[in-house]
Every structure is written in structure tokens, then in C-alpha cells.
């Protein structure tokens, strides 16, 4: 079988794997993006000796629709634009095991976060306005430049995006690996 014919036969499995991976990546992002700030707020209130501030249901699920309307299509686009070539590249080199999928997509997830974060920082720096951003009492950007705390915060987020990538890689491998045909005849 030619290499092109072999590549074409894997498309339905890969598409299924990428769709599942994008939904799992989106769901993982929503959980992490919601849970980490809420846990930080509760832990910081406990650390200072105050009564813990537990969020209301509105604070937890308030942005869910926005996450769904914007996040699912964006996740699908990223998974197909980045995931499909990555999958083909890995398959051509024999990296088709579950462990390979987890490692490769974890690196891709962390790498994408770093690229997008760097692009956002450069865009902020190049803008004509004076922009400062504070989250949770920590100044992340001041006068269009990231602060040391802001850079540390971004570095703190890298492992979370690697975990999202690893979970998406596992989902893509599970849903997209070609299952051997099972014969219905007894041996």
C-alpha cells in the first residue's frame, strides 16, 4: 500500500480523535480556569485567618456560556490546525503509543500557551495606550510591560496547559487510534 493511501485510511479515525480531543481540552480548560482562581481565593482567605470565601454558583458558572460559545469552536480549530499535522508528524516517526500521545500533546499545549502569551505581551507592549492589569491584588502588567509577578504567574500556568495537552493527547489517542478488525468467526 502506498504511503498516500495509508495516510488517507487514517483520516476518519484521526478526525474522531481530534474532535474528542478538542472537547476534552475545552472541558479541562474550563475546569482549570474556574477551579484555580476559586481555590486561590479560598486558600488566601484561609491563609490570612479570615473565614473562607466560597464562591456562589453564579461566580462558578457565570462565564460557562461564553466559554462554550467561544471556546468550543476555538478548541476545534486549534485541534485541527495544530493537532492534525502533529499527529501526522508523530505517526510518520512511529510515535503512536499512548505514552507518546500524552508527551507530545503536553509539549504542544505548553508551547501553544507560551506562544500565545508571548504574542499577547508583545501586542500589549506595542500598543499606544498605557495598560495595567491586576488580578487578585497582584499587578501582572504595568504600563504595557509585564511585571516580575506577572511573568511568574504566566510560568505558573505552563504546567496547567501541559496537563490540558496531556489529557487531550490521551483522549485523541483513545478515540482516534485504529482498532484492529475483529473477526466474527471462531478461531
Image (cartoon, grey):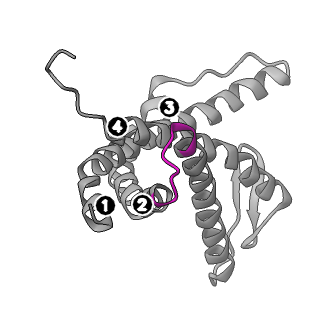
Q: Is residue 23 left or right of residue 165?
A: left
> Which numbered tag is attached to residue 76?
none
Q: Earlier in the sequence, mark 4 or mark 2?
A: 2
| Marks 4/3: CA–CA distance | 33 Å
- Give the residue displayed 40% in from the left and 52% down from the top: 75
Can you give x and y, in whole percent of width and height, for residue 5 in the image? 24, 63
Closer to the camera: disc 2 or disc 3?
2
Q: Is residue 2 left or right of residue 57?
A: left
- Residue 12 appears in view: yes
Q: Which residue is mark 2?
A: 88
Q: Is residue 42 above or below residue 172?
A: above
| Marks 4/1: CA–CA distance | 17 Å
- Give the residue displayed 78% in from the left and 49% down from the top: 138
Q: Is residue 101 left or right of residue 178?
A: right
Local secondary structure at mark 1: helix
Closer to the camera: disc 4 or disc 3?
4
Q: Earlier in the sequence, mark 4 or mark 1?
A: 1
Q: Which residue is mark 1?
A: 7
Span highlighted in magenta in the image: 92-100
Q: Which residue is mark 3?
A: 59
Can you give x and y, in whole percent of width and height, for residue 108 in the image? 57, 56
Amino acid at each position: 500500500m502506498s504511503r498516500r493511501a495509508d495516510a488517507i485510511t487514517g483520516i476518519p479515525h484521526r478526525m474522531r480523535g481530534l474532535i474528542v480531543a478538542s472537547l476534552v481540552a475545552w472541558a479541562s480548560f474550563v475546569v482549570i480556569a474556574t477551579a484555580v482562581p476559586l481555590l486561590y481565593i479560598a486558600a488566601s482567605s484561609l491563609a490570612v485567618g479570615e473565614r473562607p470565601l466560597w464562591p456562589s454558583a453564579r461566580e462558578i458558572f457565570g462565564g460557562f456560556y461564553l466559554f462554550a460559545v467561544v471556546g468550543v469552536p476555538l478548541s476545534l480549530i486549534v485541534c485541527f490546525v495544530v493537532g492534525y499535522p502533529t499527529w501526522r508528524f508523530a505517526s510518520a516517526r512511529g510515535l503512536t503509543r499512548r505514552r507518546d500521545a500524552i508527551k507530545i500533546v503536553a509539549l504542544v499545549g505548553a508551547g501553544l500557551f507560551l506562544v500565545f502569551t508571548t504574542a499577547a505581551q508583545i501586542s500589549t507592549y506595542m500598543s499606544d495606550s498605557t495598560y495595567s492589569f491586576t488580578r487578585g491584588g497582584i499587578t501582572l502588567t504595568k504600563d504595557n510591560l509585564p511585571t516580575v509577578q506577572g511573568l511568574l504567574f504566566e510560568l505558573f500556568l505552563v504546567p496547567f496547559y501541559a496537563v490540558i495537552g496531556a489529557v487531550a493527547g490521551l483522549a485523541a489517542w483513545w478515540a482516534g487510534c485504529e482498532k484492529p478488525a475483529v473477526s466474527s468467526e471462531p478461531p
